[in-house]
Amino acid sequence: MLNPGALLKHPLLVAGLVAVVIALVMFRPRAADESPIRIGILHSLTGAIAISERSMVDAELLAIEEINRGGGLLGRQVEAVVADGQSDWPTFAREAERLISEEKVVTVFGCWTSASRKTVKPVFEQHDHLLVYPMAYEGLEQSRNIAYIGAAPNQQVTPALTWGVENLGKRVFLVGSDYVWPRTINAIMKDMLPSLGAELVGESYVFFGSTKLDQTVSKIKAAAPDFVISSVVGDSNPAFYRALREAGISAESTPVLTFSIGESELLKMDPLDVGGHFAAWSYLQSLPGQTNQEFITRFRERFGAERVTSDVIATAYSSVLLWAQAVEQAQSIEVDQIRTALYGQSIAAPEGIISVDAATGHAWRSISIGRINKSRGIDQVWALDRPIRPVPFPSSRTPAAWRMYLDNLYQAWGNSWANPEESAL
């Protein structure tokens, strides 16, 4: 029998044993990383825009739950860290920083307003991180740190304006909440009106979150437009439609075509106020098809039979699934690899096929016009039969001119993406 003490007297033998031990430690099979993949969800759970954003959180959580039931990603579960932007732009920026720096999330899904997105954009660019933005917006932007899954203006605003002029009349009044999205889409539409043979008869802006709409409605009544295009958002919407009805302005006499009211917002509005008006979205709950019906069923089974789906809900849900496909394709949770894999992803979404355009980081989206009914639903009245390629910068001005337009807005508002004061318009 060998004496261990004697073995220790042979340095070469000891060195050999140590090398074997080190090799066994370094090269033994390692268990796969089973810690959760953490993602951030950043929406307003409180404040003026919570009426629209809370339901997006539900949709994103539903997608995560379905991914986890299917085994997760890369053999790991997905964990959501939910943050409240509080309908306040600086809060959005602080929460984005916290999610990235402290919570160590690999991607953030979030924002509704363009003011919140533009406020968090420098945070994501500073960290070279990734925001997935599931909301229709004004375009005029392209960042490697943002995936734009909502509709660009050429996929919602410009086809809706064309439809409105052809079907509702040529005298147009533009109204919106006073921040970057409404101001910018209205500038885009004003550039278009001459080519459509249409006329702008009035324009008015509402202080963000205000429920004082009487002055705006008085301007609409005095202008007597054929129809109104609205980008009023959040808590201002119920007040706007109520003020219209109280002023004797009906959907039959002066219809409103909105870019900001979906089925979930209608749950909080009086059908007598809003019934008969129109909405333009990529997705409507009333769309036919098995994929949509199955999505509605799953959403209601999870959150209640009384719940409805809407464009922001369906887009938020689809955004998470597109991201999940990218993670699986990349076989990585590194931000740069996820971003690269996300470009070119496609999914059979409730509205149809959604694809992420590799050239722009925006999604190919559909367009539908619907009429709001007395049961708080939206009945499709028109649609294109194909997804539309995204064009972030409308051709009516050069990209440089559009960027100058945005810079002027930002500076005029004291380096903010929303007007801090009541507008004179």
Image (spheres, helix red, strand yellow):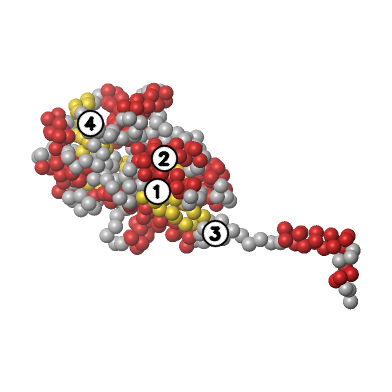
Q: Name the residue nearer the viewer: 276 or 318.
A: 318
Q: CA distance from mark 1 to mark 4?
A: 29 Å
Locate the N terminus by quadrant: bottom right
Which label sits on residue 423?
4
Judge left or right: residue 95 versus residue 224. Answer: right
**How many angstroms separate mark 4 from mark 2 (CA)?**
25 Å
- The Cα–Cα distance between marks 3 and 1, rounded to whole angstroms, is 22 Å
Q: CA distance from mark 3 to mark 4?
A: 50 Å
The residue carrying mark 3 is 35
Q: Is residue 290 visible?
A: no
Mark on residue 42?
1
The mark that comes first in sequence, 3 or 1, is 3
Q: Residue furthest bottom?
A: 1
Q: Secondary structure at mark 4?
A: loop
Task: Decide: few, some or many residues near mark 4? Use Cα within 10 Å; few <14, some 14-19, many ≥20.
Answer: few
Q: Which of the marked residues, 3 or 4, is nearer the chain's N terminus?
A: 3
Q: Quadrant of residue 223?
A: top left
Q: Earlier in the sequence, mark 3 or mark 2?
A: 3
Tell me the residue at 89%/70% (across/down).
6
Residue identified by numbered label 2: 120
> Residue 259's spot in the image, x, y percent?
28, 40
The amino acid pointed to by label 2 is Val
Residue 12 placement, left or right of 293: right
Q: Are marks 2 and 1 in contact (CB under 8 Å)?
A: yes
Q: Earlier in the sequence, mark 4 or mark 2?
A: 2
